[in-house]
Image (cartoon, rainbow, N blue to C red):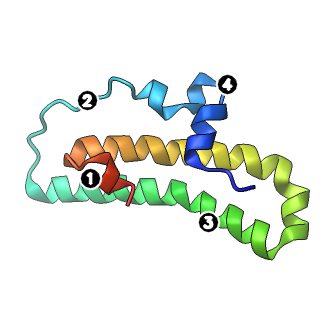
Amino acid sequence: MYITASHARATSTDPTLNADAILQNFKLAPLNLKEDKYIEWKDVLLDSFITEYDARRLYRHLADDHHAIFIELKSVLGPWLLDELDHAHGFSIIYSAFTATPMAKVLF
């Protein structure tokens, strides 16, 4: 069974592993950034979101193509993936607020 971000949020009992709870009332104050700084921060936030989400790719790669290694590491990979997916979700919330992009579009 693959672990998904929604599963991670739904099954976490640790409030620090729940971006929805932590960022529940997150709003950005109006920013007066020059365009080059806005683009720089937009890129940083997008890279952060993608980097955290790549954990899912590694998890699936090991599960599908290196099953013996996956079984040995499963007790570590599961919690690690849950944590990384929650980070990705948190960055997507921040990215959405920063760029005024609807979450549906941020999540592809």
Q: What kind of element bears circle 3?
A: helix
Mark 3 vs 4: CB contact within 8 A: no
Amino acid, disc 1: Trp
Q: Which residue is mark 2?
A: 27
Within-10-Å neighbours for mark 2: few <14, some 14–19, many 20+: few
Give the quarter of the image for residue 55.
bottom right
Amino acid, disc 3: Arg
Q: What kind of element bears circle 4?
A: loop
Amino acid, disc 2: Lys
Which quarter of the figure is the C terminus placed in? bottom left
Dot 3 or dot 4, earlier in sequence: 4
Mark 2 to mark 4 CA distance (whole Å)? 25 Å
> Closer to the camera: disc 3 or disc 1?
3
Dot 3 or dot 1, earlier in sequence: 1
Mark 2 to mark 1 CA distance (whole Å)? 16 Å
* Residue drawn at x 70%, y 61% as measured from the top left: 59
